[in-house]
Amino acid sequence: MTSESWSPKVSEIRCAQRKEGSAAVLAIGTANPANQVSQEEYPDYYFRVTKSEHLTDRKDTFKIICGLTGLENRFFYHSEELLNSHPELLDRTSPSLEARQDIVAKAAPQLAASAARKAIAKWGRPATDITHVVVSTNDVGAPSVDVFLVSLLGLRTNVRRTMLQLTGCSAGCATLRLAKDLAENNHGARVLVACVELSIAGLCSPGEGESLDALITHALFGDGAGVVIIGADPVHPVEQALFELVSVSQTVVPRTEHMLTLRMGSYGNHGKVSTKLTQVVAQNIEQCLMEAFGPTGLIVDWNDLFWAVHPGSRLMLDQIDETLKLAPTKLAASRTILQNYGNMFSATVIFVLDELRRRMEEGEPADWGAMVGFGPGFTMETVVLRATGFLKKS
């Protein structure tokens, strides 16, 4: 066979593999662990379980920080009983990475599977129709959540799996960016995206003389799993597209690598969150949005969009409101999720998307929208969304 006769055949195969339609969200599912703690009670809970009640000044400071977050509730896999059985998790002089990984390795797949079962039930097709799995988590063990989901959900053994590990909050958008490419470049692909996070990976005692970073982290983060099923060209009437993923972009802001970090060490996952991050977002978010919307050809008024913003903190949402001059209700979905669940790393923006879906099904108008995530790097991820006719008529 000559190269001339072979080349057209390769081209034909390539064309047959691709889809013409845009990738779309076909279903969403979320899940949280059973242990719910109110933010008002959390300072007492945290200092009790970490055996740190003697640090009265630190506890008073922590109460103030918790009050400033705007949170009301969070959910955790770890309980007081679990922590009492693993004292090494809270002892800053005792390596605890292996114990943390063992806990996460057992709990994370189960939590992700719980959210996935809800999404699959809403999707309406059997789990064996899933062709790809994309997972994000702050654990770095192997085999990881992606492997265990195969058996827990009854997926095909030849399902194609991709893991994003230790990528932080921006992975919620990054997984959808990857799923869009997979769905649009593989005929018939149905991609299950699972973002699952457990804060026990970085739980530690407050520590006398430590910086405020640890206290701020423990005042914000909670546990959860968000699952989305992505596909192009929905099969009617079984599948219904909710949001089309029209355009995506990723930007690393120069000279900001030190501002948001996440590292795994002997004592678990720890990182740094700069107080200047809100300024970085203010200086760069419009340019990132314009890059994402550029391919659409739309002339955009930010107040004409619906918004699925990762709610890293209330201060971050306030800064975005001010920078983009948004109407007071535009970030309501993000604020609601932050208030009721806290920051669940990559899973949070999936919860926000599901909250938007709920609001739209209740009649809230929507057409074009933007999903925005932030993560180490400092990285800004943007996804242009379009609400479908089905969602707007629900």
Image: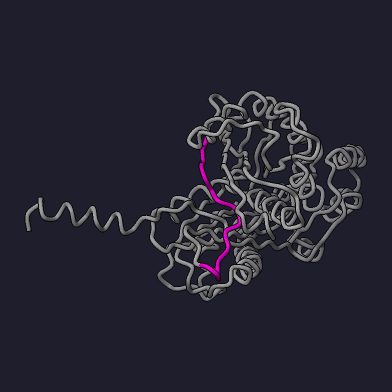
Indicate the position of residue 136 as horizontal and vertical percent values: 56, 54
**Left or right placement of residue 70 versus residue 126 in this view:** right
**In this rendering, does residue 96 appear at all?**
yes
* Residue interval drawn in magenta: 236-250
When the figure is inspected, residue 134 is found, relative to residue 129, above or below; the finding is: above
Task: Indicate whether 349 appears above or below 209.
Answer: below
- Identify which residue is drawn at 77% across, 61% down: 83
User: What x and y, as percent, mark residue 197?
Assistant: 65, 55
* Quadrant where the C terminus is found in the figure: bottom right
77 or 288, which is in the foreground? Answer: 288
* Any part of residue 88 in sight: no
Q: Quadrant of the N terminus?
A: bottom left
| Left/right of residue 136 with respect to residue 87 in the rendered view | left
Instruction: Say which residue appears at 54% left-offset and 46% top-offset.
Output: 174
Q: Where does residue 233 sit, x and y in percent of width and height?
A: 47, 59
314 vs 84: above or below: above
